[in-house]
Amino acid sequence: LKFIISSEAKKQLHRLYPKKMLRIFPKIKTWAGITYKLVQDELAEGKDNLYKIEDLLFIIDKEEEKEVSYIEIDYENDWAGEDFIITAGF
């Protein structure tokens, strides 16, 4: 699994979640695709994979991981608000 993390997302992740494990999970699955979310969580032994990317820790369910080839994480701060934008390639 490949991770692509924008420089702004890295900066915000280090600021908000230093040394915390973040789960990447599907929030909404529709015919148009999947929307993903980040939440602080613990590793479920045997069920999850843990990835360390530049001191950032990400958890993804092994079954969910089978459906994606890469995860892209960006951070937006605009008139609608601030949030991480997580997309996946299939």
Image (spheres, rainbow, N blue to C red):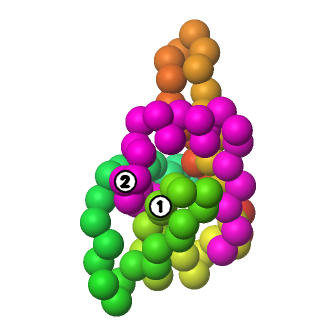
Residue at image point 50% right, 18% down: 81
Residue at image point 34% right, 89% down: 46
- Give the crowd class for mark 1: few <14, some 14-19, many >=20 residues within 10 Å: some
Q: Earlier in the sequence, mark 2 or mark 1?
A: 2
Residue at image point 70% right, 42% down: 6
User: In front: 12, or 62?
Assistant: 12
Residue 68, horizontal then vertical, whole percent: 63, 71
Specify the quadrant that holds the C terminus: bottom right
Can residue 28 be seen here? no
Specify the quadrant that holds the N terminus: bottom right
The residue tagged with tag 2: helix, strand or loop? Answer: loop
The stretch drawn in magenta includes residue 25: yes
- The span shown in magenta is 1-27
Residue 20, compared with residue 77, is above or below; it is below
Q: Which mark is residue 20?
A: 2
Q: Amino acid at mark 2?
A: Lys
Can residue 35 be seen here? yes
Residue at image point 54% right, 76% down: 65
Point out the residue furthest to the bottom here: 46
Q: Amino acid at mark 1?
A: Leu
Tell me whether circle 2 and circle 1 mark residues in contact (CB < 8 Å): yes
Residue 67, horizontal then vertical, whole percent: 59, 75
Q: Which residue corresponds to mark 1?
A: 57
Residue 30, horizontal then vertical, whole percent: 52, 55
- Give the crowd class for mark 2: few <14, some 14-19, many >=20 residues within 10 Å: some
Tell me: 35 left or right of 70: left
Residue 78, compared with residue 63, is above or below; it is above
The stretch drawn in magenta includes residue 52: no
